[in-house]
Image (tube, rainbow, N blue to C red):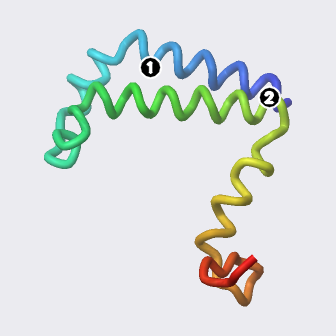
Amino acid sequence: MNIFLGLLGILLSWIIIRYREAIGNTLGEAAWMRSIGGIYYVIIFTAIFIFLWSLLMMFGLTNQVVEPIVRIFMPVEQGGVNPFQSL
């Protein structure tokens, strides 16, 4: 199932890149998008994120990649990382 969803994600990211102009014209441009390059860059970044996430799903690496990021934002009482603690 993960391989199938990963392939669908890769296909979706390719479709997003292929039709980014039509998607960008449909969505329009917000003020915050101008600071990072405009609507087309936001669409490209989204497609790259979907592509990478799909690869992680296909190879079963989502927990290994996402868990360290999530632990940074968790409170220490719930198993989060204390950035001021010496190793």
- Give the Cα separation between the discs numbered 1 and 2: 20 Å
Mark closest to the chain's N terminus, 1 or 2: 1
* Quadrant placement of the C terminus: bottom right
Residue 22, image quadrant? top left
Q: Is residue 78 above or below residue 41?
A: below
Give the percent coordinates (x, y) of residue 1.
85, 30
Q: Identify residue type, mark 2.
A: Met
Question: Helix, strand or loop at disc 1?
Answer: helix
What's the residue at 63%, 25% (across, down)? 9
Q: Nearer the viewer, residue 39 or 67?
A: 67
Tag in front: 1 or 2: 2
Query: Is the Cβ of the residue at disc 1 closer than 8 Å to that at disc 2?
Result: no
Residue 71, image quadrant? bottom right
Residue 12, image quadrant? top right
- Left or right relative to 68: residue 34: left
Give the labeled residue for mark 2.
58
Give the percent coordinates (x, y) of residue 82.
66, 81
Crowding at dot 1, Cα within 10 Å, few <14 / some 14-19 / many 20+, comes out as: many
Question: Helix, strand or loop at disc 2?
Answer: helix
Give the labeled residue for mark 1.
16
